[in-house]
């Protein structure tokens, strides 16, 4: 049983944090498009970013800032323009955005981190952003987490947020998070935007290590379409306002905090996969029997990322051969006579041998999962074992529907 529980709120649930989200006119739709997360005190900052060679200005900006100073008080995010592949002018816009935010909050620009999302190749509409800074600061509140979550969305159907609480030294410690992502989602860092707040006190290097490991078990284990974004960013702030002693080594308190961080990231990762563009259901792949966790995660990622598997799930076709084939191309050695494949409770392949199962009932399982009728809501569960090793890994994705092509065929037109 987990040592933590869910609580109300998201990024403003931890002590000392406020958030805001407004409509500044950056999106043609008139939807909220400018958000701010604010710590009342300087917070330890950690970040994980896209591995692409083509990157947004905000990614390079944040990397440079965190290398020089692993702390921050504000995260400013604009939606509508990715400000990626925009060259030197795009970086100028990023630097000006940080300065504008710093001036409005009366802090150093070094304490401002940035994120952008939207159409690649489009610079930020700076006239709109400049005009939006003052209203954004005025909107800051301890209940602003939901507004911030909405303001970072693009093609998302729903905002994504969560808050958790545990006890350390008899005092409550909280962590909150928001995320956006629906398309261009694939394991290659973080695959979307996510902002995390925490009121624990933790050392700089430990917080970064915790975040990286949490990302590896969550955002790096989801896929929607096999494409990674230029803007992928996860930023986590820990301000110490819980007044617990600083965690500086991997002791019991550190393990508890990291487990809660990982749980939060996995919740947000699943929410992104569930909200995949055109998706009708969430797919969860559990891989076991690998030599280690890394190998198991790779098998799970390969299966959930297979276009053939995703298409079969959308067609409600219990075609286990596609699952077996995907496991076989994961680059993880195993003996095929050890392979087992299950779809929900239906055993389809065992010890490398096909099994008799009720095909219509298995298809109905997929149909009902798409309608959210099962206890796991809209989750299709695929279980694969490749041997007797101790490695276990889980990955999440979604089915591939006609609507995915429609959404992306018309994205900029």
Image (tube, rainbow, N blue to C red):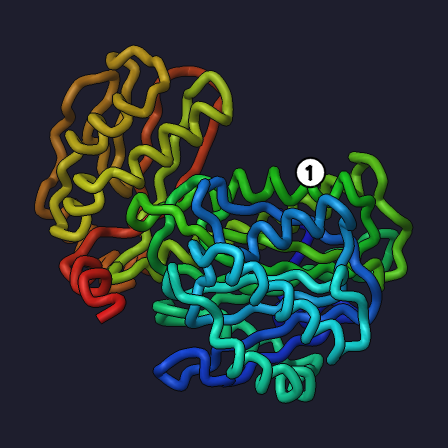
What's the residue at 87%, 52% (across, down)?
Answer: 169
Residue linked to disc 1: 209
Residue 235 in sight here: yes
Residue 333, image quadrant: top left
Residue 317, image quadrant: top left
Say if 55 sits above or below 213 in the image.
Answer: below
Say if 95 sits above or below 350 in the image.
Answer: below
Say if 51 sits above or below 327 in the image.
Answer: below
Q: Is residue 348 left or right of residue 132?
A: left
What's the residue at 66%, 86% (across, down)?
Answer: 134
What's the residue at 37%, 34% (across, down)?
Answer: 300
Residue 252 percent location from the top left of the image: 79, 38
Residue 147 percent location from the top left of the image: 55, 79
Where, quadrant-wise, is the C terminus in this rendering? bottom left
Say if 162 sits above or below 324 in the image.
Answer: below
Q: Secondary structure at mark 1?
A: helix
Q: How many marks?
A: 1
């Amino acid at each position: 049983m987990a040592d933590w529980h869910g609580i109300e709120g998201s990024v403003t649930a931890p002590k000392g944090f406020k958030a805001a989200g407004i409509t500044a006119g950056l999106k043609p739709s008139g939807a909220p498009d400018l958000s701010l997360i604010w710590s009342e005190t300087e917070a330890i900052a950690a970040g994980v970013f896209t591995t692409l060679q083509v990157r947004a200005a905000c990614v390079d900006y944040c990397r440079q800032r965190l290398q020089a100073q692993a702390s921050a008080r504000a995260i400013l995010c604009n939606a509508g323009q990715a400000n990626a592949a925009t060259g030197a002018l795009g970086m100028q816009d990023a630097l000006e955005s940080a300065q504008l935010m710093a001036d409005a909050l009366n802090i150093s620009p070094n304490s401002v981190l940035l994120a952008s999302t939207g159409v690649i190749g489009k610079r930020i509409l700076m006239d709109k952003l400049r005009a939006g800074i003052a209203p954004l600061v005025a909107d800051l509140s301890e209940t602003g987490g939901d507004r911030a979550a909405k303001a970072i969305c693009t093609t998302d159907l729903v905002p994504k947020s969560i808050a958790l609480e545990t006890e350390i030294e008899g005092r409550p410690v909280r962590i909150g998070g928001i995320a956006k992502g629906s398309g261009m989602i694939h394991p290659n860092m973080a695959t979307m935007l996510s902002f995390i707040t925490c009121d624990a006190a933790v050392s700089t290097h430990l917080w970064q290590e915790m975040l990286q490991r949490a990302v590896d078990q969550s955002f790096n284990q989801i896929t929607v379409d096999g494409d990674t974004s230029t803007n992928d960013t996860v930023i986590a702030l820990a301000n110490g306002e819980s007044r617990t002693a600083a965690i500086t080594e991997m002791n019991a308190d550190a393990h508890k905090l990291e487990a809660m961080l990982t749980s939060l990231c996995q919740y947000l990762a699943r929410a992104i996969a569930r909200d995949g563009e055109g998706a009708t259901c969430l797919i969860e792949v559990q891989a076991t029997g690998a030599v280690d966790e890394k190998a198991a995660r790779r098998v799970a990622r390969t299966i959930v990322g297979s276009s053939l598997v995703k298409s079969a799930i959308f067609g409600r076709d219990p075609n286990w051969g596609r699952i077996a084939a995907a496991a076989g191309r994961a680059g993880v050695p195993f003996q095929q006579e050890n392979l087992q494949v299950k779809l929900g409770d239906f055993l389809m392949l065992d010890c490398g041998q096909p099994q008799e199962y009720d095909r219509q009932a298995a298809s109905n399982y997929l149909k009902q999962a798409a309608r959210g009728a099962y206890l796991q809501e809209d989750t299709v569960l695929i279980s694969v074992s490749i041997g007797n090793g101790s490695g276990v890994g889980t990955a999440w994705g979604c089915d591939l529907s006609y609507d995915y092509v429609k959404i992306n065929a018309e994205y900029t037109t």
